Amino acid sequence: MLEILQQEIIQCERCPRLRAHSAEIARLKRRAYLDQEYWGRPVPGFGDPRARVLILGLAPGAHGSNRTGRMFTGDRSGDILYRVLHRTGFATRPTAVSRTDGLQLRDLYITAAAHCAPPANKPLPGELRNCRPWLERELDLLTEVRVVVALGKIAFDVYLDLMRARGAISSRAGFDFGHDREFVVAPGHPRLVSSYHPSQQNTSTGKLTEAMLTAVFRRARRLAKLGPAGSK
């Protein structure tokens, strides 16, 4: 069922502005990637169907996921994220360069609040609402998820808005975004962990370090009762 959902996401045309932007970036390309064929379509989630941890990011990067067709693959955000995921036992490799590089995720699934690359990395509220049904279906299919890690405030807000729409929470009171914070949403729902997004802006300024991000995923392992990295 996840495979069917992923194919439906790839074919999505709900947001004309985002589709036009993603396609235009794929046509123009960045000079360093002129010899590559860009993906240029909505980027589906990927990972372990029995994942106990779900990463919710913002949206594909114009020359990262929009080029490679896989979440957080081929850009600076992914460089730090996959090193951390490998160190904490969630990824089989510390690097992610293409859909065919052999990387696999263990106990982890990665998706995004928006599946198309947005101008200036800022999807509009209506575009986020258009994409939310995909996240709803992913949550329904990923029945083993115990922890949701929201990377950045937009992802955090999208997840909480969905929880409110589902009746899991009555208001946003008490859910204040911050780095490496843990929230109990409601009985029967995954714990929520918030983190700064591993964007180049955050990592180059020191707002987010590799050690800080590592702490987030070590917390996620504990909450998901996975044990230390490398344990069975």
Image (cartoon, helix red, strand yellow):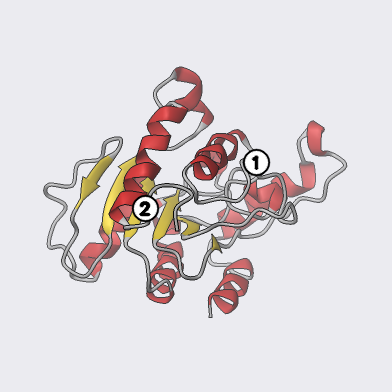
Can you name the residue that lies furthest to the front here? 232
Can you name the residue that lies furthest to the right here? 35
Q: Is residue 95 left or right of residue 231?
A: right
Q: Is residue 219 left or right of residue 110?
A: left
Residue 131: x, y in percent? 46, 63
Residue 65: x, y in percent? 63, 48
Query: Dot 1 corresponds to which residue?
Result: 95
**The C terminus - image quarter:** bottom left
Q: Is residue 205 left or right of residue 77?
A: left
Query: Dot 2 corresponds to which residue?
Result: 227
Q: Earlier in the sequence, mark 2 or mark 1?
A: 1
- Dot 2 surroundings within 10 Å: few (below 14), some, or many (20 or more)? some
Residue 152 visible in the displayed image: no
Give the foreground label among 2 and 1: 2
Looking at this view, is 154 or 215 the one in front? 215
Q: Identify which residue is drawn at 63% across, 70% down.
A: 11
Q: Identify which residue is drawn at 32% across, 62% down.
A: 146
Kind of element beneath mark 2: loop
Kind of element beneath mark 1: loop
Q: Give the Cα separation between the discs numbered 2 and 1.
A: 23 Å
Question: Which amino acid type corresponds to the residue marked 1 in the rendered image?
Answer: Thr
Residue 117: x, y in percent? 58, 49
Question: Which amino acid type corresponds to the residue marked 2 in the rendered image?
Answer: Gly
